[in-house]
């Protein structure tokens, strides 16, 4: 069941991503030779006016094959014949559609739940420390350690990633912005990792979802998710997170099953995280990704001449090979984690979503 759900979730995300490329290509007059869902041998084919639509055996990814995309073509509808601006639009459309899907899913989840979690503190837990060092009931948290807070999830992320339990915060209290330096939280030690973690000792309120606050909240949630992905990538590059913290396909399939076991809302919320992640990741300027292709087009604009297709193709081929090696390594690590889960993994599962909700 987990595998079937994962195929469904990723199938929708792939269709949206490749559909973005397809419709942008058609809008810009680019000829699309094939629109495929999945990889490997085709199990279903439907010839359109100029595009072959296929479903392939392996439910892994998909592609939108355009005329003149990987080699020069004299066809007037060839990708290589279009202006750099049009090519940028076609290449970036897939990631843009993934992020737009995330926005739609955020709105759907909010409507289903019927409420919006705010950043306003409504009570403190027993033996709370933060209320003795600056925080008060009614405070609306707007910044933590210099980072703006868009949603309650931002509060969780910033606090769970602090190491000393002393936080600089900015809150809105009685309509005024107040800087609170050195707000203290109690610390506990994770017995598995030996690392200290903050005990979040307050809870925030929720308000009823209305037509007026639905779209602004959905936008904030989408922007927050995209920003957290970038922050996480920077933290990985800086060494704050290691290879064992990366979750691959097997781990994601397992997480999809766990989310679905809770309710449909949790599944859609996790799907929102995945699709925004796919969109942001694809925009990274790495070979074989959309962001890598965008980088070559930008270089063409700056140089005023295109990079030879064979050189660009070689760069993307090497990048794709490296990504596959990384994928295999991450998948192996996922399997080990499932076979022998650690206390740290269990703790991560506990802190997914809602830990600040008003009881």
Image (cartoon, rainbow, N blue to C red):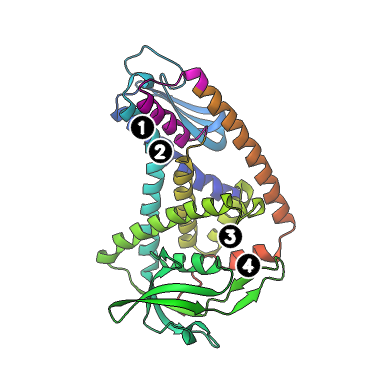
- Label 4 element class: helix
User: Marks 3 and 2, how far apart in space?
Assistant: 28 Å
Looking at marks 2 and 1 on the same chain, the residue that comes earlier in the sequence is marked by 1
Outermost residue on the right side: it is 340
Comparing marks 4 and 1, which lies closer to the viewer? Answer: 1
Q: Is residue 308 magenta?
A: yes
Q: Which residues are magenta?
A: 287-311
Residue at which label 4 appears: 347
Comparing marks 3 and 2, which lies closer to the viewer? Answer: 2
Q: Are marks 2 and 4 in contact (CB under 8 Å)?
A: no
Looking at marks 2 and 4 on the same chain, the residue that comes earlier in the sequence is marked by 2
From the top left corner, tell me how far across and down residue 28 is, in percent: 29, 27
The correct choice, above or below, for 190 with respect to 136 in the image is above
User: Marks 3 and 4, how far apart in space?
Assistant: 14 Å
Residue at which label 2 appears: 94
Would you say residue 174 is visible in this rendering? yes
From the top left corner, tell me how far across and down residue 214 is, in percent: 30, 63
Q: Nearer the viewer, residue 44 or 120?
A: 120
Residue positioned 39% across, 48% down in the render: 99
Outermost residue on the top side: it is 74
């Amino acid at each position: 069941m987990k595998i079937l759900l994962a195929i469904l979730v990723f199938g929708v995300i792939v269709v949206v991503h490749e559909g973005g490329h397809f419709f942008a290509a058609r809008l810009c007059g680019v000829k699309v030779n094939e629109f495929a869902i999945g990889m490997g041998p085709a199990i279903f084919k439907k010839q359109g006016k100029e595009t072959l639509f296929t479903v392939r055996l392996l439910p892994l990814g998909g592609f939108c094959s355009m005329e003149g995309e990987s080699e020069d073509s004299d066809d007037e509808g060839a990708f290589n014949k279009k202006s750099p601006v049009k090519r940028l639009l076609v290449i970036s459309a897939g990631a843009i559609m993934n992020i737009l899907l995330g926005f739609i899913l955020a709105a759907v989840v909010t409507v289903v739940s019927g409420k919006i979690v705010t950043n306003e503190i409504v009570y403190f837990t027993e033996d709370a420390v933060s209320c003795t060092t600056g925080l008060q009931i009614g405070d609306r948290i707007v910044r933590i350690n210099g980072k703006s807070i868009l949603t309650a999830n931002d509060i969780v992320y910033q606090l769970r990633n602090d190491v000393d339990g002393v936080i600089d915060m900015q809150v809105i209290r009685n309509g005024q912005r107040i800087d609170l330096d050195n707000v203290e939280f109690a610390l506990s030690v994770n017995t598995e990792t030996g690392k200290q973690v903050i005990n979040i000792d307050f809870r925030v309120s929720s308000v009823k979802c209305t037509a007026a606050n639905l779209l602004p909240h959905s936008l904030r949630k989408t922007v927050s998710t995209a920003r957290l992905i970038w922050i996480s990538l920077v933290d990985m590059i800086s060494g704050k997170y290691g290879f064992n913290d990366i979750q691959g396909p097997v781990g994601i399939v397992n997480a999809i099953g766990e989310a679905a076991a809770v309710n449909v809302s949790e599944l859609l919320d996790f799907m929102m995280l995945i699709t925004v992640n796919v969109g942001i990741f694809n925009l990274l300027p790495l070979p074989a990704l959309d962001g890598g292709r965008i980088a070559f087009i930008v270089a063409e604009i700056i140089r005023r001449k295109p990079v030879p297709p064979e050189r660009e193709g070689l760069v993307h081929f090497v990048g794709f090979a490296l990504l596959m090696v990384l994928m295999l390594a991450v998948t192996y690590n996922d399997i080990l984690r499932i076979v022998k889960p650690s206390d740290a993994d269990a703790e991560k599962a506990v802190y997914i979503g809602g830990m600040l909700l008003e009881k």
